[in-house]
Image (cartoon, grey):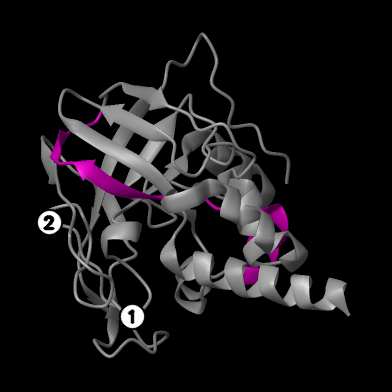
Amino acid sequence: MTRISQAGPSHPPTVLTVNLGRFKPVEYTDAPSGGTGIDKRPADGLVRVVAPGPKGEAASGLIGDTVSDTRHHGGNDQAVYAYAREDLDTWERELGRELPNGAFGENLTTQGIDVTGARIGERWRIGPDLLLEVASARIPCRTFAAWLGVERWVKRFTQAAVPGAYLRVLEPGGIRAGDPVEIVHRPDHEVTVGFLFRAATTQRALLPRLLAAGDALHPELRESALSSAETLSITSKN
């Protein structure tokens, strides 16, 4: 899959749709709830976005959105999930099927933003009030695969390395479809969403380099990166 989500003059950075999911009972999840909120549809009007709270206790940052398995989803560091419309378009061609906004379970379907190239700690101002910070990358799970019904989907998604971004809420606010996105801070390091995803999946040797993202790095990935760096240090000394 060729990544094409590049901002351009014809497509200023914009939120195309704000997508919310409702609880749906399914057989293909091991969530204690017995269901999923991955089926997200564009919302009408303003949607309030807040920092939901710690992972495991809190759910989505979008009021009215459903997270059915808080063991793995939701919480402050995964409050909002964004995916580029440009990348959905590429997947449409790859899969030969329509993928409407929200099809990947994303809360924000964007246009004109290179989401995979966004750096960890990068900050997006959306509308007058909301300030989001890029925190991590989406790791595919079996619920995602079953929802799409694509054979070997987890492997295909992982190999493509176009995962979309999880964002944390620094300043709450309301957003709606069509809101402009302004990148107000871009850190000076190499750790993009795509780099982080490869380090967490197919190129684990990159893990120590994630530490360059500093405090913006997801706490769980920080632990993995520190452990990997420590192992590398011990190995080099021996």
Q: Nearer the viewer, residue 62 or 16?
A: 62
Instruction: Give how far across and how far down residue 33 sits, in percent.
Output: 24, 86
The quarter of the picture where the C terminus appears is: bottom right
Mark 2 surroundings within 10 Å by alpha-carbon count, few (fewer than 14), some (14 through 19), many (20 or more): some
Mark 1 surroundings within 10 Å by alpha-carbon count, few (fewer than 14), some (14 through 19), many (20 or more): some
Question: Does dot 2 land on a helix, a strand or a loop?
Answer: loop
Residue depicted at 36% across the width and 42% down the height = 133
Q: Is residue 51 positioned above or below 101 on the image?
A: below
Q: Is residue 168 positioned above or below 129 on the image?
A: below
In this rendering, does residue 160 appear at all?
A: yes
Q: Is residue 160 on the magenta stretch? A: yes
Question: How much space separates mark 2 and mark 1, taking CA atoms?
Answer: 19 Å
Marks 2 and 1 in Cβ contact (< 8 Å): no
The range drawn in magenta is 151-177
Farthest top residue in view? 9
Residue depicted at 12% across the width and 56% down the height = 64
96 left or right, relative to 123: right
Q: Which residue is mark 2?
A: 64
Q: Which residue is mark 1?
A: 71
The amino acid pointed to by label 1 is Arg
Residue depicted at 68% across the width and 73% down the height = 230
151 left or right, relative to 36: right
The amino acid pointed to by label 2 is Gly
State which mark lies toward you, 2 or 1: 1
Would you identify the image quadrant in which residue 159 lies?
Answer: bottom right
Q: Is residue 137 positioned above or below 111 on the image?
A: below
